[in-house]
Image (cartoon, rainbow, N blue to C red):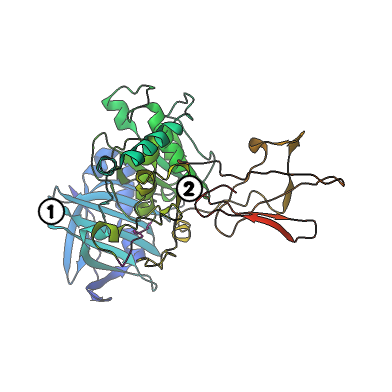
Amino acid sequence: MGRLPTLLAAAAASGAGAARIGSGADLFAQFAPAFAAAKRGAGALEETSMVLPTGAGGVVEVDLSDAEVDAEGVYMAANGRVHGVAASDFMMKGTAEDMYGWVTYEDEGRALEYRSLDDGAVDVREVALEEVKPGCGVQTEEEAVANLTEADRRAYEALAERHEGTYNGQDIRYLQSLPGAKAVLMLDIDVFFRNKALNDDVTRYSKRHFYENWQTVAAGFSMFELNVVTDWEVYRRASIRDRGLACFFDEDGRSAAWPNSFGSNRCGSFNYRQETGYDLGRTTLHEVGHQFGLRHHGYVHSSGQDGAYFVGLPEFKYVPIMGNFLKGSFMGWRGDVLYQWSKGEYAGASNTGQDDLRLIQRYVARRQDDIRGNVPLKIAGTAVRAAENRGKIADSQDSDAFTFAVGSGGGRVDLDVDRTEYVGGAMLDVEATLLNAEGKVVARSNPTARRSA
């Protein structure tokens, strides 16, 4: 096996428990032979290893499984494992100015984390394994449903049935949420095609189940220029820096993810079975949130599991996606449940400095506002149809304005403003304000625990 040159650098102090190992430019250049080997084919790359400094004069040898650089030669990503250590993993990605990666020793519960500093140097520090591979301990669906009251169980089952009618036979191997978008998130559901023949029944193995999973993830990222796909060709056409991969397993288990792994070929999240497609979709949203670098939203005045994952606000039927994201289903909140990316703004929040939307935007751009200014309502006779009068609310600062006129003789107008997504993309809490021609408020509606107005 060919070994790439070691990046030699004197270890210098770089914060508690960390050491500087050289510049990001030098680390990036060390991978150049790996990119050349990858172009020659998988066999050539499998014969390639490299040696990374670990600080204080130590080194670690890693065997590469893939390595890729973008067309401009400025962004790279590589994966592998420690030579001779089966229960290990390796990832490195980024530009010469901004490198990030890690080496894990899973049996030892530890990892080495590499990160660029503001001055262009790279430091390495030893961290606990869960810092780079958090295993999510949210209560599984089976565990939670087993503890429901009979009334909540009936509400839960009604909810599952109520929102499973949206699948119209689409081929789930070629789904795209935003064709043409620069960034792509691939949902790898191939394991289910390999292991069993999917049918059209409403079971957790059905085509409908995985359509709803895709639909939920797409809705959760609909404010971004991100194409959520199940089509491998679309994924492969995207640049290495603009793609992410979420994988699914045909077994029960607790899902997990590699933080900051978007922008690589790594299977960045591991998503296990759930009873409904919508709950699998919310699990995937949570885990992909980790791929974008998000941490859990917890609660500092609690302990145990509820402390690590905020369980929501029952009076508002609200729960953050990076908290206990399945809680809304289990509590029988039905169609009024509200899931959102959070800023940690609730009382007792453990992660007040994390603005989820802003952090995701480090990887993918926000979509342009679809309605700027005022748009006349489309009225057919006396009817205002939802399909012809809709807009997209991207964040809490966004608003859409529609206008209409009442004749000189006056009259009565009844308008219901509702979100188009319920369980799959239940992220909007509608506040509707009615203004007169002079811009003065005539009426306002924003029920506490109802999403429509």
| Image spot of residue 129 (x, y percent) | 21, 58
Camera sees residue 345: yes
The label nearer to you, 2 versus 1, is 2
Is 113 one of the magenta-colored residues? no
Measuring 74% from the left and 37% from the top, which residue is drawn there? Answer: 379
Mark 2 and mark 1: Cα distance apart in space: 35 Å
| Image spot of residue 183 (x, y percent) | 48, 47
Q: Element type at marker 2?
A: loop
Q: Relative to 445, is 342 on the left or the right?
A: left
- Asked if 290 appears above or below 344 in the picture, the reply is above
For the record, the magenta segment spans 293-301
Measuring 49% from the left and 52% from the top, which residue is drawn there? Answer: 449
> In the depicted view, which residue is nearer to us: 61 or 281?
281
Residue highlighted by disc 1: 107
| Image spot of residue 72 (x, y percent) | 46, 52
Q: Amino acid at mark 2?
A: Phe
Residue highlighted by disc 2: 221
Asked which quadrant contains residue 433, the reply is: bottom right
Q: Relative to 3, is 445 on the left or the right?
A: right
